[in-house]
């Protein structure tokens, strides 16, 4: 909203300083400051409201140190993240940008699913919350929306060649031809030369105009990624500060990808695909990072509030959509390596337990407990140490991901 207001003031009233709002970097800076202020100032009020409404966490005794002390801690703290993200975005971002609109829809969609899950757990005293199949239906529904928009919306285009061809005649430029924007299902393969993969090529065996059927491959890929990443974030939310901190690191890296991919000069220098209009996501990402860091003010050990599924599912959905929008979804196993490890630890634990129970008559375990962070708790590590070390690993993975811009 403020973007359009100051754009009007700059054009019609020549207001000094109003032109600064046209710059993504300026609006991103304002967004991160505003989201930090909102999450820290209003976060306390939201926590007090949740406490008055007795919206507290019900903790099962799993034999973990300090676990019983967390019973009754307010949950649904994801509302702080959602509120502190959307307000700066609505004020400072270009709301006619397809990527920004898609991220706002993702935030509200996944936030609603998580809110329903938390509500059922707390108010209806249902320990299971929203049934798994309904969560999956919600994730698939979002995947269909995101996949459809990214595939069919005319504003979602790329340029793989960002060079400009100038035709000279008699010492002056007659024609300056820039490469055309095109619809494409191409994505980036990290750490490889000529690092582009087009999902449509999977259907090349069909011959003829096979590219028009690329959505058959692309949309299921989108659904899978959104479901996997949102579940990974959900599993990571198990100890104070872990999910919010590791997510902030990953989102910050995605913000760099979005900025350089949406800037024709940087994308040309780095020799990566240029994605028109994607740079505007940097404003959203700045607000989201600020909200996550502000939430950590209350969520670090000992936590005054938990994000609940309202926050964790929303975080995972946003990260997945950001990666898909900047064509870096194949980098998710590296960038979101913490989420992957948490997911795998559960899958391996359950699979091995079932296998050994069938073969030997008794179930055996690979980890002392899953997800992975609980394994280290069982080994006697303090929560703060586990979180700090996971953050360090997350920073290393983010740096390694960013290196993929030039290391091929």
Image: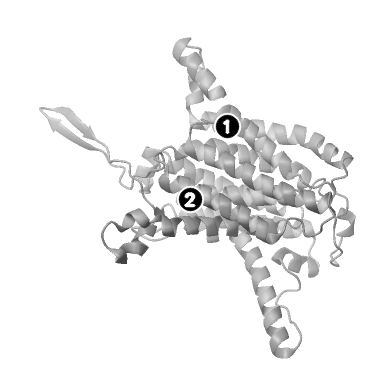
Residue 170, can we see it? yes
Q: Residues within 10 Å of mark 1 (few under 14, many from 20)?
A: some
Q: Residue at x 88, y 44 (%)?
A: 54
Q: Position of residue 55 (x, y in %)?
A: 84, 46
Find disc 1 in the rendering and name its residue.
29
Q: Residue at x 62, y 45 (%)?
A: 109
Q: Nearer the viewer, residue 61 or 96?
A: 96
Q: Position of residue 118 (x, y in %)?
A: 76, 50
In space, the residues marked 2 and 1 are separated at their CA atoms by 30 Å
The mark lying in front, picked from 2 and 1, is 2
Figure check: 57 above or below 376: above
Q: Residue at x 53, y 41 (%)?
A: 102
Q: Secondary structure at mark 1?
A: helix
Q: Residue at x 48, y 43 (%)?
A: 258
Q: Residues within 10 Å of mark 2 (few under 14, many from 20)?
A: many
Figure check: 46 above or below 329: above
Task: Locate the C terminus by quadrant.
Answer: bottom left
Q: Nearer the viewer, residue 368 or 50?
A: 50
Q: Position of residue 188 (x, y in %)?
A: 41, 55
Figure check: 369 above or below 241: below
Q: Residue furthest top?
A: 13
Q: Secondary structure at mark 2?
A: helix
Q: Nearer the viewer, residue 342 or 169?
A: 342
Q: Position of residue 59 (x, y in %)?
A: 85, 58
Residue 189, can we see it? no
Find disc 2 in the rendering and name its residue.
147
């Amino acid at each position: 909203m403020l973007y359009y207001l100051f754009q009007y003031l700059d054009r019609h009233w020549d207001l000094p300083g109003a032109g600064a709002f046209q710059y993504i970097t300026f609006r991103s800076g304002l967004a991160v400051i505003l989201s930090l202020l909102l999450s820290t100032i209003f976060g306390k009020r939201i926590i007090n409201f949740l406490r008055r409404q007795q919206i507290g966490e019900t903790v099962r005794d799993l034999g973990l140190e300090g676990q019983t002390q967390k019973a009754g801690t307010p949950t649904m703290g994801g509302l702080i993240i959602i509120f502190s993200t959307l307000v700066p975005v609505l004020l400072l971002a270009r709301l006619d940008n397809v990527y920004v609109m898609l991220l706002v829809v993702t935030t509200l969609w996944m936030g609603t699913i998580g809110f329903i899950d938390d509500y059922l757990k707390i108010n209806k005293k249902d320990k299971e919350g929203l049934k798994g199949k309904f969560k999956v239906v919600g994730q698939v529904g979002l995947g269909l929306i995101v996949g459809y928009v990214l595939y069919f919306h005319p504003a979602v285009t790329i340029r793989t060649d960002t060079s400009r061809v100038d035709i000279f005649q008699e010492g002056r430029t007659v024609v300056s031809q820039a490469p055309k924007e095109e619809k494409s299902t191409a994505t980036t393969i990290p750490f490889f030369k000529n690092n582009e993969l087009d999902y449509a090529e999977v259907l090349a065996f069909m011959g003829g105009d096979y590219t028009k059927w690329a959505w058959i491959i692309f949309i299921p890929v989108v659904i899978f990624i959104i479901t996997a990443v949102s579940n990974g974030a959900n599993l990571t939310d198990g100890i104070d500060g872990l999910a919010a901190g590791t997510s902030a690191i990953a989102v910050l890296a995605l913000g760099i990808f979005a900025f350089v991919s949406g800037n024709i000069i940087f994308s040309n220098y780095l020799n990566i695909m240029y994605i028109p209009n994607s740079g505007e996501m940097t404003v959203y990402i700045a607000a989201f990072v600020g909200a996550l860091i502000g939430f950590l003010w209350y969520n670090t050990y000992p936590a005054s509030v938990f994000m609940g599924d309202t926050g964790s599912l929303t975080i995972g959905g946003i990260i997945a959509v950001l990666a898909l929008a900047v064509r870096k979804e194949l980098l998710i196993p590296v960038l979101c390596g913490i989420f992957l490890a948490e997911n795998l630890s559960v899958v391996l634990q359950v699979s091995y337990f079932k296998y050994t129970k069938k073969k030997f008559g008794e179930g055996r375990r690979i980890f002392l407990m899953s997800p992975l962070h609980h394994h280290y708790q069982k080994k006697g590590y303090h929560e703060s140490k586990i979180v700090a070390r996971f953050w360090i690993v997350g920073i290393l993975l983010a740096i390694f991901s960013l290196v993929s811009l030039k290391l091929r």
